[in-house]
Amino acid sequence: MTIELHGIVLHGFHGVLEEERRDGQRFLVDVELDLEHDQAARTDSIEDAVDYRRIVERVRQISDDRAYHLLEAFAATIADVLLDELPLTAVRVRVRKPDVVLDPPVGYAAVSVERSRR
């Protein structure tokens, strides 16, 4: 069973440029979590589920804890923390930077990372 949360909107101070780290900007985070078990599907009980609120809050905490220079480091940290803290077999994280300034313009810059238990 997989939980998907797409488009978690954060305001973070991540980036290489001084103005990115000073002013901050919008980031969109997508997570896909492969669960170790499907107990919640059988019991229909939040006590047996991975609570979406906890996931979103943890992603926000990771963003707020420090300023990352690279999307690669930010996405990898989210994936590593979620895999470590939740009953998962695998996690996929994509971090998008929709307001990236490049010439020529692009819709967004993004990094995806996947982690799994060995």
Image (spheres, rainbow, N blue to C red):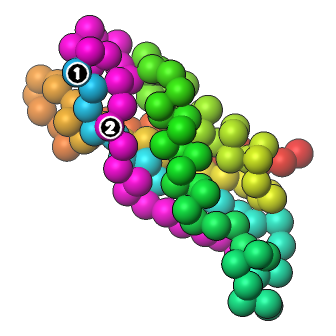
Q: Amino acid at mark 1?
A: Asp
Res 6 quadrant in image: bottom left
Q: Secondary structure at mark 2?
A: strand
The quadrant in which the C terminus is found is: top right
The quarter holding residue 26 reads top left
Q: In the rendered image, is residue 75 in sight?
A: no
Q: Position of residue 50 (x, y in %)?
A: 69, 67
Helix, strand or loop at label 1? It is helix
x, y percent for residue 98: 25, 41
Task: Give the residue at the far left of this rendering.
Answer: 104
Q: Which residue is mark 2?
A: 11
Q: Is residue 97 left or right of residue 78?
A: left
Stretch of the chain drawn in magenta? 1-22
On residue 23, the disc is 1
Q: Nearer the viewer, residue 77 or 57?
A: 57
Tell whether position 20 is magenta.
yes
Q: Residue furthest front?
A: 47
Q: Position of residue 83 (x, y in %)?
A: 74, 47
Q: Residues within 10 Å of mark 1 (few under 14, many from 20)?
A: few
